[in-house]
Image (cartoon, helix red, strand yellow):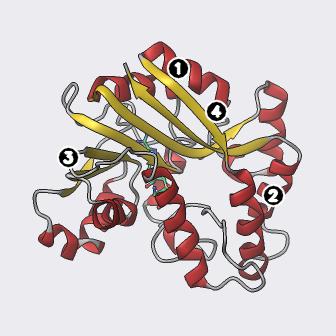
Amino acid sequence: MDHNHIPPTVRRTYGADDLSTAPSFAGGFINFGDWHGIDLTAPSPEDRVHSQEQLYRRVLATFPEPREQLRLAEVGCGRGLGAALALREFRFASVTGVDIHPDQIERARAVNARALATYPDRLAFTLGSAGELPFAHASLDGLYSVEAAQHFRELATFAREAARVLRPGGRLAVTTFFAAPGAEITERLKILLASFADGLDVAHPLDAFTTDLTTAGFTAVSTESIGADVWPGLDRYLTDTVPADHWTRNFLPAWRHGLLDYHLVTATRT
Ligand SMILES: C[S@@+](CC[C@H](N)C(=O)[O-])C[C@H]1O[C@@H](n2cnc3c(N)ncnc32)[C@H](O)[C@@H]1O
């Protein structure tokens, strides 16, 4: 299997369509956000950016202090704003953003040109895929991913790759939406959400991923449901930014009906 093959919907969404420019996102980030503590009366584009930064902070805060010695990589870095935030705010030794789409790597390098010049040895963006990570065995102290794993065709290979590139004791943190188990749920998601119907998103059950991690050599695998901080805030923002019948409005009912949830998964390499 060619792990660097880009599925057609992923190629289009992050190539010509450049999803970061869609009204549901803001500031160059492409995630649904952690809206905890944000006033939802009339959320602004600045609030939207803040929600996306907060999601990154929630993931990055799982890496234990002291962080100055930690070499990290992000899988599915998009425009690389989260990787730059990781370096700036969390002061890791280095952060390498990896993305499967060459356009995203080009954008990440352009958007973060100043940060790349400021930290030439500490920040980098490189082409690569979750199924074939561009790192040597045991070369990283931490690996994280924000709202990208729903695009990975299968998670067992990603779990094995994460285990390969992390040193013993290295930490993994992955956040995105996972499906409830069952073929019937997958069918219902495809009816409600165009991204599942057209193959952009894959309905990965959470339990299957945690099993993949244990099988690959991770311990202390832990999951936290964070949907309550994601979906109501996102939907409030969408109310003002997309038409009422836009398919993305179906994420909230899908969550309320238990078809999917947003999770933060952490694990330690044995
Ligand atoms: C929803 S965006 C999230 C971007 C960024 N993490 C953020 O929060 O702004 C998902 C990103 O994952 C990338 N991606 C999709 N499949 C991938 C894979 N198999 N390996 C690495 N990156 C992938 C896409 O190209 C896209 O840039």
Residue 252 is marked as 2
User: Could you tell which of marks 4 and 2 lies nearer the N-terminus?
Assistant: 4
Q: Which quadrant of the view contains residue 38?
A: bottom right
Using a 10 Å C-alpha cutoff, classify the residue at mark 1 as few (fewer than 14 neighbours), some (14 to 19) or many (20 or more): some
* Secondary structure category for the residue under label 1: helix
Which residue occupies the foreground of this view, 67 or 177? Answer: 67
Q: Which of the image's four quarters has the N terminus?
A: top left
The answer to whether marks 2 and 3 mark residues whose Cβ atoms lie closer than 8 Å is no
Q: Mark 3 sits on what residue?
A: 69
Kindly report the distance in space between the C-alpha atoms of the residues bearing marks 3 and 4: 33 Å
User: Could you tell which of marks 1 and 2 lies nearer the N-terminus?
Assistant: 1
Using a 10 Å C-alpha cutoff, classify the residue at mark 2 as few (fewer than 14 neighbours), some (14 to 19) or many (20 or more): many
Q: Amino acid at mark 2?
A: Leu
Q: Amino acid at mark 4?
A: His
- The residue positioned 47% from the left and 30% from the top of the image is 267
Residue 253 in the image, given as x and y percentages of width and height: 86, 54
Kindly report the distance in space between the C-alpha atoms of the residues bearing marks 4 and 2: 18 Å
* Secondary structure category for the residue under label 4: loop
Looking at the picture, does residue 55 appear above or below residue 258? below
Residue 168 in the image, given as x and y percentages of width and height: 29, 23
The answer to whether marks 1 and 4 mark residues whose Cβ atoms lie closer than 8 Å is no
Decide if residue 223 is on the left or right side of residue 250. Answer: left
Kindly report the distance in space between the C-alpha atoms of the residues bearing marks 1 and 2: 28 Å
Q: Mark 1 sits on what residue?
A: 212
Residue 246 in the image, given as x and y percentages of width and height: 78, 68
Q: Mark 4 sits on what residue?
A: 204
Which residue occupies the foreground of this view, 223 or 180? Answer: 223
Q: Amino acid at mark 3?
A: Gln
